[in-house]
Image (cartoon, helix red, strand yellow):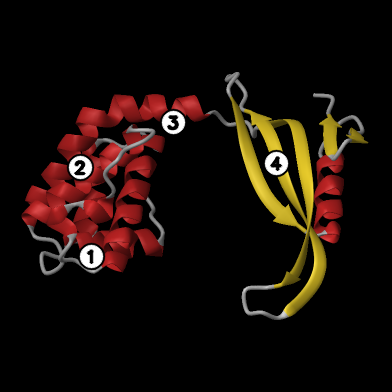
C-alpha cells in the first residue's frame, strides 16, 4: 500500500512516543475514525485534552495523515497483514499497530458504506444565482475599483435528491471562463436565461 510522503511523515510523528504517548495515540486514532464516520461532531481534534500539550500543527498533520491512511485501507480493502506491513515500515510498535487494526476491523463495514454513499459522479448543477458587488479597496487598503460577482450554484448529487449550495466569487473574465468550461463539458449546448438578477443554466444530461 503506497502512501504519499506527507501522509508517511504524519504517521511517523504519530509513531513517535516523544510526540504521542500511548494515551494520546489512542485518542488520535479514535478521533480520526469518529471524524470519518460522523457527518457532524461537536468535538474536534484540537479540543481534546489529551492532545493539547502537542503542537497544533503536528496534531493537524497527524490527523490528516491517519484519516487518509484509513480511507486508503478501506479503498484498497486492505487486510490486517497488509496494514501491519505498512505500519511497521513507518515504525509503529506492535501495540500501536494492534490498536489501529482493531479499530479498523471494528469500523471497516461502516466506512465502506460511507464511501459507497459518496458515489463517483460529479454533482449536477440545477440552478445558479448571482449578485454583483463593486470593490473599492482590498484588505490592504489598496484601490481596486473593480466589480466582482458572488455566485451561488444549486447542485444535486446523483442518487440523492438533497440539494446543496456552492458559493464563490469571481470577476467578469473568470465568470466567462467558467461558463465556457461548463458549456464545453456538455454533450448538448448549454443555454441560459438572465432575468431579474438571476441566471439559470439549463443543461441537457
Marks 3 and 4: which is nearer the front?
4
Residue picked out by circle 2: 30
Residue picked out by circle 1: 13
Q: In this view, does 145 lie to the left or right of 55?
A: right
Of callouts 3 and 4, which one flags the residue occurring earlier in the amino acid sequence? 3
Residue 42 in percent (x, y) is at 29, 40
Q: Residue at x 39, y 63 (%)?
A: 6
Label 2 to label 1: alpha-carbon separation = 16 Å
Residue picked out by circle 3: 115
Q: What element carries label 4?
A: strand
Residue 78 image-quadrant placement: top left
Label 3 to label 4: alpha-carbon separation = 27 Å
Name the foreground residue: 53 vs 135. Answer: 135
Of callouts 3 and 1, which one flags the residue occurring earlier in the amino acid sequence? 1
Residue 77 in percent (x, y) is at 35, 33
Of callouts 2 and 1, which one flags the residue occurring earlier in the amino acid sequence? 1
Query: Badge 4 local density, few (<14 within 10 Å), some, or many (20+)?
Result: some
Of callouts 4 and 2, which one flags the residue occurring earlier in the amino acid sequence? 2
Asked if labels 2 and 3 touch by Cβ distance under 8 angstroms, the answer is no
Q: Which residue is drawn at 33% across and 55% down?
A: 65
Marks 4 and 1: which is nearer the front?
4
Q: What element carries label 2?
A: helix
Query: Is residue 62 visible in this depiction of the protein?
Result: yes
Of callouts 3 and 2, which one flags the residue occurring earlier in the amino acid sequence? 2
Q: Is mark 1 on a helix, strand or loop?
A: helix
Label 4 to label 1: alpha-carbon separation = 40 Å
Marks 4 and 2: which is nearer the front?
4
Q: Residue 71 carries which label?
A: none
Residue 71 image-quadrant placement: top left
Residue 89 in percent (x, y) is at 23, 59
Quadrant in which the C terminus appears: top right
Residue picked out by circle 4: 152
Amino acid at each position: 500500500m503506497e502512501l504519499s510522503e506527507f501522509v508517511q511523515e504524519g504517521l511517523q510523528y504519530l509513531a513517535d512516543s516523544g510526540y504521542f504517548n500511548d494515551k494520546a495515540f489512542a485518542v488520535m486514532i479514535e478521533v480520526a475514525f469518529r471524524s470519518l464516520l460522523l457527518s457532524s461532531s461537536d468535538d474536534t481534534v484540537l479540543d481534546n485534552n489529551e492532545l493539547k500539550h502537542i503542537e497544533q500543527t503536528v496534531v493537524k498533520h497527524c490527523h490528516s495523515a491517519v484519516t487518509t491512511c484509513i480511507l486508503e485501507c478501506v479503498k484498497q480493502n486492505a487486510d490486517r497483514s497488509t496494514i501491519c506491513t505498512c505500519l511497521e515500515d513507518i515504525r509503529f510498535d506492535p501495540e500501536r499497530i494492534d490498536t489501529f487494526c482493531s479499530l479498523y476491523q471494528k469500523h471497516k463495514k461502516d466506512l465502506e458504506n460511507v464511501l459507497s454513499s459518496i458515489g463517483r459522479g460529479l454533482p449536477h448543477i440545477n440552478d445558479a444565482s448571482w449578485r454583483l458587488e463593486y470593490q473599492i479597496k482590498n484588505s490592504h487598503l489598496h484601490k481596486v475599483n473593480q466589480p466582482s460577482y458572488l455566485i451561488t450554484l444549486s447542485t444535486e448529487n446523483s442518487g440523492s435528491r438533497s440539494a446543496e449550495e456552492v458559493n464563490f466569487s469571481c470577476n467578469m473574465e473568470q465568470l466567462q471562463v467558467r461558463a465556457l468550461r461548463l458549456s464545453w463539458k456538455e454533450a448538448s449546448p448549454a443555454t441560459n436565461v438572465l432575468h431579474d438578477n438571476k441566471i439559470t443554466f439549463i443543461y441537457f444530461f
